[in-house]
Image: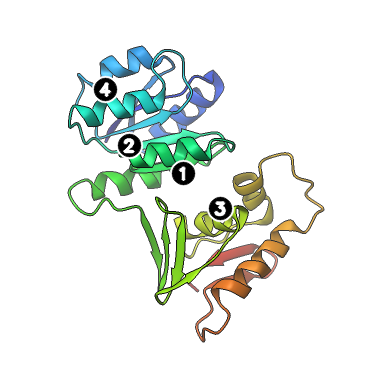
Amino acid sequence: MRILLVEDQAKLLSFAKKGLEEQGIQVDAISDGDEAWEMATTVPYDALVLDIMVPGRDGLSILRGLREKRNNVPVILLTARSTLPEKIEGLNLGADDYMTKPFFVEELAARLHTVVRRKAGDSSHLLRVDDLCINLLERKVSRGGTDIELSTREFELLEHLMRSPGRVFGRMQIYEHVWGYNMDPETNLVEVYIQRLRAKIDKDHDKKLIRTVRGVGYALGGG
């Protein structure tokens, strides 16, 4: 697989490039949007990873231009935590997925393989585990066909768990992905939000989807 990675933070660009190449992915790494646009329109990449905010053409502008040219190369957007409107705009423009920074390179590699495999098939923005479904575009959640109302943070936590069904995430991993690096590790926010999700997701269902792995962390599905 050959991809184009566009990110203006030099340290993150180098880190992600090295990590993805260790996963067997060939990476062209660029920090400028204008150069990225030229390469994206001339090189037959298997996928693009675009930071929304880069010098020159920004990630959304590159995505918009590609879709206008009917170029359906899979695109994963990289976003800051405060850019929910941009995430929604990106999905509406035809992005295949998005990730918030910071992220694990292994997860980015897994998502790249997913969007590339999905290129010839269904590209809907749905995540499913058992009878639980998230619609990323409409930001809706349902289980067994019944809609579930979640707060923004509850939604982000559930999405994070559903991205890797069966994978056990430790408390600090969840903090880093859902709240960011500035959280006090002594707080019990993760436990509080897990309980809130259980009350909404698993209540009245014989099959419980949210698991606690004692001494390790939490997972959704599997086990």
What numbered label is drawn on residue 156? Answer: 3
**Total numbered labels placed on residues in the image:** 4
Q: Which residue is mark 4?
A: 40
- The residue closer to the viewer here, 112 or 17, is 112
Comes first in the chain, label 3 or label 1? 1
Q: Secondary structure at mark 4?
A: helix
Comes first in the chain, label 2 or label 1? 2
Q: CA distance from mark 4 to mark 3?
A: 30 Å
**Residue 21, image x, y percentages:** 39, 32
**Residue 41, image x, y percentages:** 22, 21
Three-letter amino acid code at the position of disc 1: Glu
Three-letter amino acid code at the position of disc 2: Leu
Q: CA distance from mark 3 to mark 2?
A: 21 Å
Comes first in the chain, label 2 or label 4? 4
Q: Which residue is mark 2?
A: 93
Q: Which residue is mark 1?
A: 106
- The residue closer to the viewer here, 182 or 68, is 68
Color style of the picture: rainbow
Three-letter amino acid code at the position of disc 4: Ala
Quadrant containing the N terminus in the rendered view: top left
Q: Is residue 83 left or right of residue 63?
A: right
Q: Secondary structure at mark 3?
A: helix
